[in-house]
Amino acid sequence: MPKPLRIALEGNIGVGKSTLLESLPGYLRGGDWQALPEPVANPEFKRLLQAFYVDQNKRVDLHMWIVKERMRETIGLSKDSHYISERSFIGDMVFAYANMLKHERPDGRYMGLIYESLEYGRHFPLDAVIYLEATPDACMKRIRSRSRNAEENIQEHYIQYLHNCYQTHLHEIARHFKIPVIRIDWNEFRSTEYIAQCVHTTLGIKSEDVQNHVEEQRRLRVIS
């Protein structure tokens, strides 16, 4: 098998990464694809997320915890599977830049977060990043509709600010590391098949690889 492929979903809070992550691996071809969602069910994640929206000076704590959790997760990844991650070191760096400017008196933890994110990027090098792009207004509507308790304090101006930071920093970071960006207009949800085809084109997964996957699935259905 060729080297494992690793891609990530990126985008603003509420844009719809988790929803796409649930379905996309089943449409991606060229081998076995596994999803790596954010650890939203972890009690520590929930505690830090609550603090994230209450006190802007504590936002770095959540991202530092997530990076360390991802580092531990990476150690156990199979070398025979491809992976698609919800967020990546790029997103962590975007948040580090964004929140350092909003911090009342930023300290060395923000530089520490950048260094830790870069280290994670070396352990989980990306072959592509899917940037789900939607207006701040669309993100706010989705945040309200999903009604997560910790998100009730999100302010629209913060979502607008993050949108601006993503527009500026994500592409520059990806360009620096020579990571292709698959930019998707996500104001209206597109079909999962369409997103998968964009990935196949970017990663050079040939049509015969797709056909082989389809035929294998048919054989498995016959056997079962």
Image (tube, rainbow, N blue to C red):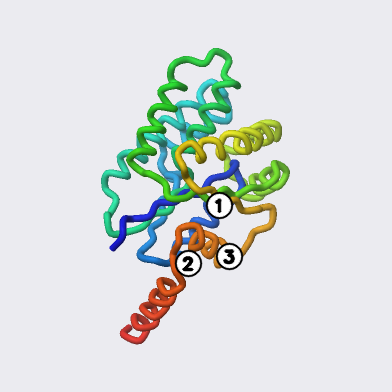
The answer to which of marks 3 and 2 sits earlier in the sequence is 2
Instruction: Judge from the rendering whether residue 81 lies leftward or rightward of residue 135; answer left or right.
Output: left
Give the residue at mark 2.
27
Q: Position of residue 174 (x, y in %)?
A: 50, 40
Secondary structure beneath label 1: strand
Residue, x 49% and y 32% (percent of image)? 93
* Rendered-image quadrant of the N terminus: bottom left
Q: CA distance from mark 1 to mark 2?
A: 16 Å
Measure the alpha-carbon separation of dots 3 and 2.
10 Å
Mark before the other along the chain sequence, 1 or 3: 1
Q: Residue at image x 53%, y 65%?
A: 197
Report the Cα–Cα distance between label 1 and label 3.
Answer: 12 Å
The amino acid pointed to by label 2 is Tyr
**Residue 161 percent coordinates (x, y):** 66, 31
The x and y percentages for residue 151 are: 60, 38
User: Which is in the foreground here, disc 1 or disc 2?
Assistant: 1
Foreground disc of the pair 1, 3: 1
User: Can you identify the residue that label 1 sits on?
Assistant: 182
State the SS at label 2.
helix
- Asked if disc 1 and disc 2 are in contact, CB closer than 8 Å, the reply is no
Residue occupying the point 61% across, 45% down: 14
Query: Which label was assigned to residue 73?
Result: none
Q: Nearer the viewer, residue 209 or 94?
A: 209
In percent of the image, x 69 and y 57: which residue is there?
Answer: 188
Query: Is residue 154 placed above or below 104 in the rendered structure?
Result: below
Quickly name the residue at label 3: 194
